[in-house]
């Protein structure tokens, strides 16, 4: 059996397009035989508020122009409709909290309502030259010559994310900028960043949280998951990061093979994280 997909987006995330559909995603999940999906919609800050972690950092930042707040009422109504139509599919509410160590107030307001089952913590912004820059944008701006600098800055900030926020349970897309390597870049080798990866994994394991295997990003290797084990990591979560229905559960069979080769296996039920 395929594992639960714990990282899915629908029409309620501001960065999805006309093809996004919670109902169609549920239909695809049932077709694939997924036991569960979690609709973890984007929650990102449009401004820094008093008390947010950004106050203590000397970093310039501009919110994304397309950013929209989550319509919680509409989202929850859609969840209820999907649960009614697909009673055999476990459908979880959730959010993907962006940079909660820097913009904690935004996620805190939603989580205080107690209406969300699954909370992911994510980092899309890397501190480069005194500015918070989206990872893909940074690589496009600086080109192949600064790939290593961007990746190291990003992974260093992930450590700050883990240590600076306790609102999330699962760390999403560990090495997000890796998706956007510019043409002409040297081949990406996880081993070149082993100290930075281990620092992230050590902080995450020490916090007792869960590492996501994100199948939209290049898959983590068996070796990297071995580092997760070495640092004390005990659980992994599968997430397609799907923004359109046909990508729910994408590449899960391959991801399962990688995770099993690293010594992790299914939990007690089909809905549980995989553990070692």
Image (cartoon, rainbow, N blue to C red):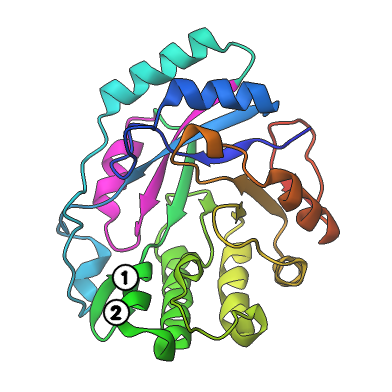
Q: Identify the residue under disc 2.
A: 141
Q: Is residue 35 visible?
A: no
Name the element at disc 1: helix
Task: Look at the image and tell me in which quarter the N terminus lies.
Answer: top right
Foreground of the two, 137 or 269: 137
Q: Is residue 150 above or below residue 209?
A: below
Residue at image x 61%, y 19%? 89
Other-residue count near label 2 (Cα within 10 Å), few / some / many at <14 / 14–19 / ≥20: few
Q: Position of residue 91 (x, y in %)?
A: 54, 24
Foreground of the two, 181 or 123: 181
Q: Can you name the residue that lies furthest to the top here?
A: 84
Residue at image x 41%, y 74%? 157
Q: Which residues are magenta?
A: 90-114
Other-residue count near label 1 (Cα within 10 Å), few / some / many at <14 / 14–19 / ≥20: some
Q: Position of residue 4 (x, y in %)?
A: 65, 35
Q: Position of residue 105 (x, y in %)?
A: 25, 50
Q: Is residue 58 above or below residue 21?
A: below
Mark 2 touches mark 1? (CB < 8 Å)? yes
Foreground of the two, 141 or 220: 141
Q: Identify the residue under disc 1.
A: 137
Position of 71 compared to 183: left or right? left
């Amino acid at each position: 059996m395929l594992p639960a997909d714990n990282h899915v987006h629908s029409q309620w995330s501001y960065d999805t397009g006309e093809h996004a559909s919670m109902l169609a995603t549920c239909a695809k999940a049932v077709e694939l035989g997924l036991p569960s999906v979690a609709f973890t919609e984007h929650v990102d800050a449009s401004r820094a508020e008093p008390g947010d972690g950004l106050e203590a950092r000397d970093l310039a930042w501009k919110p994304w122009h397309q950013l929209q707040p989550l319509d919680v009422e509409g989202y929850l109504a859609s969840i209820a409709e999907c649960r009614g139509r697909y009673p055999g599919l476990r459908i979880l509410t959730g959010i993907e909290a962006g940079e909660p160590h820097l913009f904690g107030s935004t996620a805190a307001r939603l989580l205080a309502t107690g209406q969300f089952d699954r909370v992911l913590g994510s980092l899309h912004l890397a501190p480069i030259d005194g500015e918070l820059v989206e990872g893909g944008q940074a690589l496009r701006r600086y080109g192949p010559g600064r790939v290593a600098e961007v990746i190291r800055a990003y992974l260093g900030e992930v450590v700050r994310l883990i240590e600076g926020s306790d609102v999330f349970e699962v760390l999403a897309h560990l090495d997000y900028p890796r998706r956007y390597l510019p043409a002409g870049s040297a081949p990406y080798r996880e081993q070149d960043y082993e100290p930075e990866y281990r620092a992230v994994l050590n902080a995450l394991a020490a916090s007792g949280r869960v590492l996501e295997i994100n199948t939209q990003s290049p898959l983590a290797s068996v070796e990297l998951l071995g580092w997760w084990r070495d640092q004390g990591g005990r659980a992994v979560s599968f997430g397609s990061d799907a923004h359109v229905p046909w990508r729910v559960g994408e590449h899960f069979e391959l991801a399962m093979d990688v995770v099993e080769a690293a010594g992790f296996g299914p939990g007690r039920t089909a809905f549980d994280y995989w553990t070692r």
